[in-house]
Amino acid sequence: MSFSGYSFCKPHSASYARVSFQAAYLKVHHPAEFIAAVISNQGGFYGAFAYVSEARRMGLTILPPNINHSEIGWTGADSAIRTGLLSIKGLSAGIQARIVAERRHGLYRSMREFLERVKPAEDEARALIHSGALDELNPGGNRAALMWELGCGLKSGSAKSRPQTQSLFSSADKARTCKPPLLPPDDERERLRREFAVLGFLCDRHPMELYGRTLRKLRTVKAVDLPRHLGKQVRLAGWLITGKVVHQTR
């Protein structure tokens, strides 16, 4: 009320109050749908990482992108939100629309089928693999095997390389059906690093959890426990969510 007295005109203030009330109501009574809509809107001061962190704090489950279940935008229901295809860096709007449109003719059952029906560029297919969107096509959970199948698809022409992207294979010969060899399990930290690179967040955990052992050695204090350390010097650890650079002119 005091803010409205000197900043905005009263109609403007009233509009902000109404929007704030509506947003608060939706966040309390329809949290999954609300957070999904906020991220899909791609606006505001914060990026997806901040909203995903808030969703996790609210007790919501963050479901990874999935070519058979994800829409272009984020979706929410009950206590879970599903990552939308729009959050995968390097994935063009055209491919996002084609993935969803092709699904009307049936779900994708294999990597080879997906490449033949959608024909993504090599860098787009890599982004889909690293994001976890294609994990369903490899029940073993080994993304290296999916990369192997992508290489076979590129060789046989099921996928395409952008002009500026170097193909995995220089040969244009038709590839025979190639079954992935016995590959070692994915290195977890490397898998998470690549997932973070294409999504900007991790679906199953906060990145700070990867440094748990180090933080325990440093005896850091969580923000929620600060009231128990009044008058004491403490050490905190945090993750930069956003920033704003202000240049001072003279």
Image (cartoon, grey):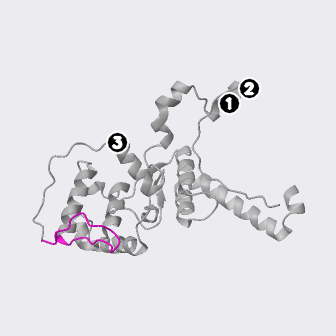
Residue at image location 61% in from the left, 29% down from the top: 221
Q: What kind of residue is marked 3?
A: Glu
Mark 3 vs 1, N-terminal side: 3
Residue position marked by numbered label 3 in the rendering = 188
Residue topped by disc 2: 230
Where does the image place residue 191, in percent across and percent down from the top left?
35, 47
Q: From which residue to which does the magenta span run?
A: 156-173
Q: Are marks 2 and 3 in contact (CB under 8 Å)?
A: no
Nearer mark to the viewer, of 2 and 3 = 3
Task: Examine the rendered structure and indicate whether residue 250 appears above or below residue 158.
Answer: above
Marks 1 and 2 sit apart, C-alpha to C-alpha, by: 7 Å
Are dots 1 and 2 in contact, CB under 8 Å? Answer: yes
Residue identified by numbered label 1 = 226
Q: Secondary structure at mark 2?
A: loop
- The residue type indicated by label 2 comes to Leu
Q: Quadrant of residue 210?
A: top left
Q: Is residue 195 magenta?
A: no
Secondary element at tag 1: helix
The amino acid beneath tag 1 is Leu
Residue 245 screen position, x and y as percent: 68, 56
Residue occupying image coordinates x 42% and y 57%: 198
Q: Position of residue 34 (x, y in %)?
A: 56, 59
Which is more N-terminal, label 3 or label 2? 3
**Is residue 243 visible to the viewer in this orientation of the structure?**
yes
Judge left or right: residue 50 versus residue 11.
left
Seen from the viewer's position, the closer of residues 123 and 135 is 123
In the rendered image, which quarter is residue 186 located in?
top left
Classified by dominant secondary structure, the portion drawn in magenta counts as loop
In-front residue for pair 33/130: 130
Q: CA distance from mark 3 to mark 1?
A: 33 Å
